[in-house]
Image (cartoon, grey):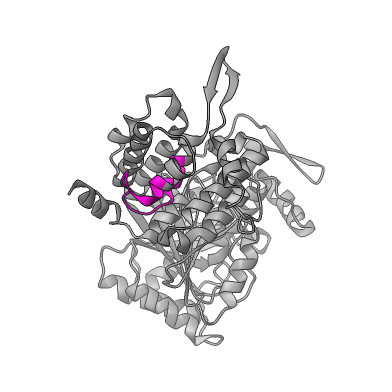
């Protein structure tokens, strides 16, 4: 009876979400990561060889193996003929190893680590008499004592039910030392997923820079941001900490993929595919904006009535029907008061009047394009925005002045990414000009910026194309860009 109850608790989350979580572990910290390539290869090949018999794993093994091949630097797992060489691989896994650490001799092997990992790849409750268990510990000579196997089975089931106290009780034996990786990774993911989720709907006209804004929050340019109608469908970006790759899901398909490289190309293809209505992306947000809670951004197509009526319809449907806590309304600092913007503002105003619990934050993007030599000023931009919004029915609006483009450039430099010649010239200008206090965009917001970045102490300078830049100054420019102002509302 207990097994049935545990199985119900374990299967409360869908297998899709379960395997997404498995793909979100920080495998760069996995004990096998530090071993030689032959052992890493044997470990992953053997995992797939056994787990592929499970129906649930079969549905999601492709993204899992794609991720493992990348994380553990191995390739062509599917082509490996495992049946004839499985015993050789098992001997490699269970082999006793020695190493000196802190003046002590440590004796260990990876068979317990492997067995726990294998059970984690099986969705749902596992009993000791399950064929999957017997196949590994008995028939295939993994040489795990039944009592040890029973402990690991209970350990994995405890993780799956969220009983971390019970799971931790199995970790006090030296032979199970490596199981700490799964305990820590599973617990962090579970606690994160149980946290309160905040959802933000991003709307604006075609020229407002929504994609650039979202890229600045992610710290990577994955959304197309050319000066045209870029986003053609709904994109939902879900913050998933601890990972360096992206998890993609199309529409409501019960499948996903792990994208390691070429995310920009993949996103362009998805955006241009007329058969896809919605894309879900999971990945971490920018390192310069530490988000500890669950955050979801819903990016809508830029509205422009004369170019694509469907873009406007999709955006209005999202405002009506999507689940979100706050609206981030992007405005172009150089094009306030266009017909498209007034039309969209009118619809947003009508909607939020019926939903008083939906706050709206107005983000005046491209504030770096204000030309002081043409008698323009940031203070005048703020006042004209207030007047414009008041004319459209928004009293006492919350306003942020922002340059998502400057934020993106700064993050590129901090990450050591290459810049084009144009980007290099622009960054050089911003590096000097926006370091000045007079260009601090946070001073021209309706609320002061409460967040201050933590500047790394391990690096003082960064070099890009033989030019050296001061890290502290870059963070000053980044702060003045207004990007940290977003933290006030999240």
Q: In front here: 271 or 212?
A: 271
Give x and y (percent) for residue 69: 61, 51
Q: In front here: 290 or 140?
A: 140
Give x and y (percent) for residue 341: 47, 76
Residue placed furthest toward the top: 103
* Residue in view at x 67 percent, y 32 percent: 460
Residue 465 left/right relative to 311:
right
Residue 413 left/right relative to 192:
right
Tally the marks: 0
Give x and y (percent) for residue 384: 48, 66
Magenta-colored stretch includes residue 207 = no
Residue 353 left/right relative to 246:
left
Q: Is residue 90 visible?
A: yes
Q: In front here: 169 or 337?
A: 169
Per the rendered image, the range of residues in magenta is 115-134
Give x and y (percent) for residue 257: 53, 62
Identify the image quadrant of residue 37. top right
Residue 7 left/right relative to 268:
left
Residue 347 higher or lower than 123, as above or below = below
Q: In front here: 443 or 192?
A: 192
Q: Is residue 448 visible?
A: no
Magenta-colored stretch includes residue 125 = yes
Residue placed furthest toward the left: 1
* Residue in view at x 59 percent, y 77 percent: 272
Residue 283 higher or lower than 335, as above or below = above
Identify the image quadrant of residue 314. bottom left
């Amino acid at each position: 009876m207990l097994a049935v109850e545990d199985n119900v608790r374990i299967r409360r989350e869908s297998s899709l979400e379960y395997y997404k979580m498995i793909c979100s572990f920080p495998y760069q910290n996995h004990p096998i990561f530090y071993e030689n390539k032959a052992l890493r290869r044997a470990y992953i090949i053997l995992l797939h060889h056994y787990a592929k018999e499970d129906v649930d794993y079969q549905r999601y093994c492709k993204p899992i193996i794609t991720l493992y091949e990348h994380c553990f630097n191995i390739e062509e797992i599917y082509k490996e003929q495992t049946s004839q060489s499985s015993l050789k691989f098992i001997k490699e896994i269970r082999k006793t190893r020695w190493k000196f650490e802190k003046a002590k001799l440590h004796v260990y092997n990876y068979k317990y680590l492997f067995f726990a990992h294998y059970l984690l790849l099986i969705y749902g409750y596992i009993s000791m008499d399950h064929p999957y268990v017997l196949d590994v510990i008995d028939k295939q000579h993994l040489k795990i004592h039944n009592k040890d196997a029973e402990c690991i089975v209970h350990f994995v089931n405890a993780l799956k039910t969220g009983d971390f106290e019970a799971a931790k009780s199995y970790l006090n034996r030296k032979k199970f030392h490596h199981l700490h990786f799964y305990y820590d990774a599973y617990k962090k993911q579970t606690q994160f997923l149980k946290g309160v989720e905040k959802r933000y709907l991003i709307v604006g006209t075609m020229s407002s820079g929504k994609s650039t804004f979202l890229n600045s929050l992610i710290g990577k340019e994955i959304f197309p941001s050319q000066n045209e109608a870029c986003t053609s469908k709904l994109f939902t970006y879900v913050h998933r900490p601890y990972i360096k790759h992206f998890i993609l899901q199309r529409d409501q398909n019960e499948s996903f993929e792990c994208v390691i490289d070429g995310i920009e190309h993949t996103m362009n293809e998805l955006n241009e595919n007329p058969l896809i209505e919605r894309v879900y992306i999971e990945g971490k947000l920018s390192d310069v904006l530490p988000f500890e809670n669950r955050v979801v951004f819903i990016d809508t197509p830029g509205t422009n009535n004369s170019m694509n009526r469907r873009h406007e319809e999709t955006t209005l449907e999202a405002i009506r029907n999507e689940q979100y806590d706050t609206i981030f309304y992007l405005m172009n600092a150089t094009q306030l008061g266009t017909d498209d913007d007034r039309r969209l503002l009118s619809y947003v105003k009508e909607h939020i009047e019926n939903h008083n619990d939906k706050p709206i934050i107005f983000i005046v993007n491209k504030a770096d394009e204000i030309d002081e030599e043409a008698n323009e000023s940031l203070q005048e931009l703020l006042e004209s925005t207030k007047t414009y919004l008041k004319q459209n029915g928004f009293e006492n609006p919350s306003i942020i002045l922002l340059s998502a483009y400057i934020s993106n450039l700064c993050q590129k430099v901090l990450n050591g990414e290459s810049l084009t010649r144009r980007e290099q010239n622009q960054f050089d200008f911003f590096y000097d000009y926006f370091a000045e206090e007079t260009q601090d965009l946070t001073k021209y917001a309706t609320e002061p910026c409460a967040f201050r970045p933590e500047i790394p102490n391990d690096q003082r300078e960064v070099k890009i194309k033989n030019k050296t830049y001061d890290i502290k100054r870059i963070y000053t420019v980044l702060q003045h860009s207004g990007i940290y102002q977003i933290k006030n509302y999240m």
